[in-house]
Image (cartoon, rainbow, N blue to C red):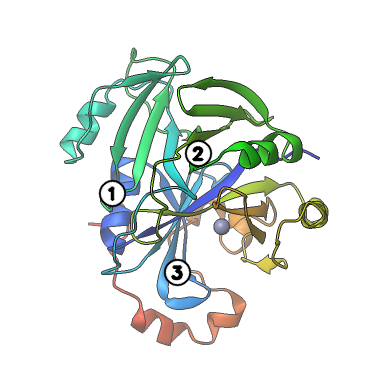
Amino acid sequence: MQIPGIHHITAIASDPQRNLDFYTSVIGLRLVKLTVNFDDPGTYHFYFGDSQGKPGTILTFFPWPGANSGRVGTGQATAVPFAVPTLAGWTERLTAAGVAVGSPIERFGEQVLRFADPDGMPLELTAPTLDGSFTEVTGFSGVTLSVQNPEATERLLTSTFGYTTLGTEGNRTRFISTAGDTVDVLREPEMRRGTMGAGTVHHVAFRAESDEIQTKWQLELSKLGHQVTPVLDRQYFHSIYFREPGGVLFEIATDPPGFATDETPDALGTHLKLPPWLENRRSEVERILPKLRMPGVR
Ligand code: ZN
């Protein structure tokens, strides 16, 4: 069994409108699902992705108005890198949106632009080149994890998940999945532990192609001594969670049923969707949720 790459990354934000505007207008992702936090239905759950909401392009947020900022640190995903064919035009676009951005750096032969979202969450754009003309984000290039002692995390990625080691630059070791997305593990012995809050990543979800494969992972990971949760129904996928040895919360999420299960591909993200067990409380939920101006609507 091999993990065929990242399914989604989930993070915490504060102001919902600011988060929605940034990821749609500035980063250029599509809102592919507008729903609520199933454990806290007075809070939104935003899913951003490519036009079809393919696994591997999905960044999700729980935006809590007025949420305290978290601290980016060890035991967390400490950068979310997006892939673009070229960095051309991106410095101008980010600067015009009021985003502070430095000069591109080179890493593993790629050009990398580093900046942060409005809550301070570290983001990157990675591209093979600076040349050409502006192009949109195509999805994640991977994820970056910061841990104090990376050995056990690296063993999990290679021996268990089936990632291949690509190389090491400084304190960064890069692993690649069969799908071509990467996990960078940073050795950070001096960095403080991260704390949850706005501007931090909550968990990283990896793909399972089917429920059967997910069940096999649940057994396999338990056998290896990881504390794995039961399968949870997330409406658009099924999830199991465990904390990897470096402290980062990992999830394994199924590709099916996907985001087109309760609205057509054209209409993804245009209406508030609720799971069946919350549908009879819709009017109450809609009353509590902060009002939103939808992307593209003036
Ligand atoms: Zn998740």
- What amino acid is at disc 1? Gly
Mark 3–mark 1 distance (CA, rounded to whole Å): 27 Å
Dividing the picture into quarters, in which one does residue 256 lie?
bottom right
Give the number of the mark in front: 3 or 2: 2
- What amino acid is at disc 2? Val
Asked if residue 265 can be seen in this view, the reply is: yes
**Image mark for residue 167:** none
Closer to us: 82 or 288:
82
Q: Secondary structure at mark 2?
A: strand
Dot 3 or dot 2, earlier in sequence: 2
Q: Secondary structure at mark 3?
A: loop
Give the number of the mark in front: 3 or 1: 1
Residue that label 1 marks: 120
Q: Quadrant of the N terminus?
A: top right
Say left or right for 235 vs 266. right
Residue pictured at 31% horizontal, 63% vertical: 16
Residue that label 2 marks: 143
Dot 3 or dot 1, earlier in sequence: 1
Mark 1–mark 2 distance (CA, rounded to whole Å): 16 Å
Residue 2 vs 71, above or below: the answer is above
Residue that label 3 marks: 272
Mark 3–mark 2 distance (CA, rounded to whole Å): 29 Å
Image coords of residue 266 (percent x, y): 51, 51
Ligand 1: image quarter: bottom right
- What amino acid is at disc 3? Leu
